[in-house]
Amino acid sequence: MTTLDPQQAVRQLGERGYVILENVLSPTIIERLRQVVDERMHQERVTPYGPAEAPKAAGDDQLESYLSESYTVSREELTRLVQRIRHTRAVNHGTPWPVEPERVNKCFLHLPTLFDRDRSQRVWNLLTKGEEIADLVEHPEVLGIVRQVLGDDCILSDVSATSIGGGTDGGAWHVDVPLGQLPEPLPDFPLTTQNAWMLDDFTPDNGATRIVPGSHLSRKKPTWSGGEMDGEVTLCAPAGSVAVWLSNTWHRSGPNTTEQPRRAILCYYCRSWVQPFTDYTRDLTAEQATGMSPTVRYLAGFGSRGLRRG
């Protein structure tokens, strides 16, 4: 779809589970967003987030095994990942989870920043790391489509950047948070939508997202594994386009057989009563928050979270 026809986009989301809106961003904006993402990725690769050491707890060996089996991370990244989880647990007064690691809501887990054996990378918390990102979050036409799906009071669950490195095999098939922890049959309506803003052309060879059209109607979850899936399609479009898919649509990042990374910014929205993946009210400074529009502030959690009562 090359034009922003909201009704047609919403119909396609309902029927196929995804839609692509081509050439939404200008070349100037694309280049500026690339600069923001590249600078942050370089900075965080050189100086990864590593909080202070925190005590080990019972079950940490099981947690480490789960993370190692679920994600293609290096030993160094796995060590940092466990360190981040321990630090957050210490901040939360040493409170343990009441369930085994594979049943923990992903909103409560730190996930890798480097993966595919350090060839691919994520930048979390992107809304706090570049003022240009807010414009994507409240892009009027695209946000209008999201609101038709999730309700006018929907909120932002997360904003991140991804770079799928050259020579990587692709990710595992999955549905998005929080559906991975829900039993089947899954809800027959979407809880979230993912908006993938393409900073590079998405091609069959460079790690473009794979989708199984109509899989959202099955009310099932795919097995967490890679490889080809019957009926899968590749979301191909030029840089500056945005792909939107429903949380219950089966998808994964594809193999990147080129020598160049494939970059995107992911704006993830959820219904107002769903636990957000990231709490931006903790990380945005007062200056950052007041500099944003009321729409972005609401989406980021200001005025749309639980209250301190009494």
Image (cartoon, grey):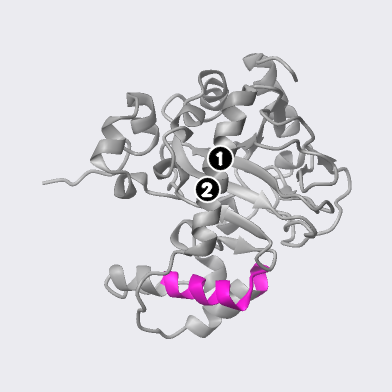
**Which amino acid does the dot numbered 1 rest on?**
Gln
Q: Quarter holding the N terminus?
A: top right
Q: Write down the region rendered in magenta.
A: 69-85
Q: Which residue is labeled 2 in the image?
A: 39
Counting from the top left corner in percent of width and height, residue 279 is at 37, 48
Task: Work out whether residue 21 or residue 19 is closer to the camera in this orientation and state it.
Answer: 21
How crowded pointer 1 is (Cα within 10 Å; few <14, some 14-19, many 20+) is rated as few
Asked which quadrant contains residue 118, the reply is bottom right
Q: Residue at x 59, y 72 (%)?
A: 67
Q: Which mark is residue 192?
A: none
Counting from the top left corner in percent of width and height, residue 73 is at 64, 70
Q: Which mark is residue 35?
A: 1
Return the residue found at the far left.
310
Total number of numbered discs in the rendering: 2
**Which amino acid does the dot numbered 2 rest on?**
Glu
Q: Is residue 181 left or right of residue 172?
A: left
Are the two marked residues, 2 and 1, in contact with CB atoms closer than 8 angstroms?
yes
Counting from the top left corner in percent of width and height, residue 202 is at 76, 38
Q: In the rendered image, is residue 267 in sight?
A: no
Return the residue found at the far right.
230
- SS for callout 1: helix
Magenta stretch encompasses residue 83: yes
How crowded pointer 2 is (Cα within 10 Å; few <14, some 14-19, many 20+) is rated as few
Q: Is residue 282 left or right of residue 226?
A: left
Q: Residue at x 52, y 63 (%)?
A: 46
